[in-house]
Image: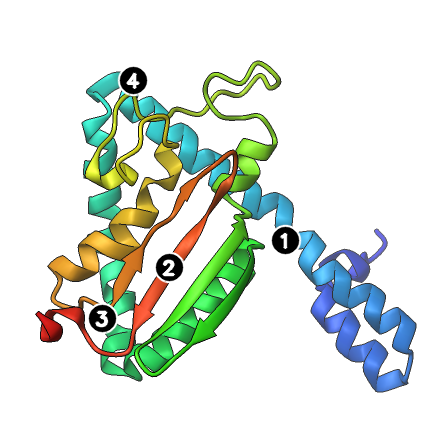
Amino acid sequence: MRNREDLAKHPLDKTLEAIDRGEQQLAKKYAREIWDEGRPLHDLYGDMCALFCTYIADKLGEEAVEDVWRMIGNELWKPVLMGVKENGGTAALVEVYASFLRAHGYKFYAEEDHEKVVFYSSYCGSGGRMMEEGKIEGNPNHSVNMGTTKKPYKWSCDRGNFPYYCVHTPLWMDMMPREWGWDVFKSEDGYNGLCCGKTTIYKEPQSKNK
């Protein structure tokens, strides 16, 4: 049997080795592969989440979509967010949130003043990608049809036809942190053809200003 070490070597390792050898163009090629290699799995897991939500809505009613995203938020997102609160506060949250957007493949820019940091997104690499690919309910251009809300809800940015997958954004990046006592997020995410929007991270909890 022939050892296929090449199949096990991550593009990051190949990138670092090429840098050490001074092979700049090869290092650039491998650096690009770091991103490209992870995208299919990222997209598959996003699509899986969207279809899970669609199945839940079909079986239990779409209000259950809020329930399941709340459950996941309490189990997974709350410990992360509260850990950030205790270890760096809103300055750390800005860095963490930006890293999430970059990892998802967002197109965005950010602005800061004395009160807040505002993220403006023109493309979302998860829910927006699904819409761009025609995978959302009602689009005849794809065999996969991921569900959307049949009427507006607070947890769907007050919109009908809002993708079930995207529901985690208004919940996790607006409503639930406020319920947990850290009122620093304001999410105005929605979509106009594609997922895009505006997310504000305040430097001080807004409850202090009321």
Q: Quadrant of residue 143?
A: top right
In this rendering, which labeled residue sits more in front, label 1 or label 4?
4
Q: Which of marks 3 and 4 is nearer the N terminus?
A: 4
- Which circle marks residue 38 in the picture? 1
Q: Say whether marks 1 and 4 touch (CB < 8 Å).
A: no
In the rendered view, does 186 fall on the left or right side of 63? right
Q: Which amino acid does label 2 sit on?
A: Thr
Q: Say whether marks 3 and 2 touch (CB < 8 Å).
A: no
Q: Going by the picture, which residue comes out furthest to the top?
A: 140
In this rendering, which labeled residue sits more in front, label 1 or label 3?
3
CA distance separating discs 3 and 4: 33 Å
Give the camera-side residue of 78 and 37. Answer: 78
User: Disc 3 marks which residue?
Assistant: 82
Q: What residue type is labelled 3?
A: Met
Residue name at image x 36 percent, y 79 percent = 92
Please tell me how crowded label 3 is: few (under 14), some (14-19), or many (20+) other residues with Cα within 10 Å: some
User: Disc 4 marks which residue?
Assistant: 58
Q: What residue type is labelled 4?
A: Asp
Q: Is mark 3 on a helix, strand or loop?
A: helix
User: Disc 2 marks which residue?
Assistant: 199
Q: Which amino acid does label 1 sit on?
A: Gly
- Residue 122 x %, y %: 54, 51
In the rendered view, does 143 fall on the left or right side of 148? right
CA distance separating discs 1 and 3: 28 Å
CA distance separating discs 2 and 1: 26 Å
- Residue 188 x %, y %: 34, 51
- Residue 185 x %, y %: 27, 63
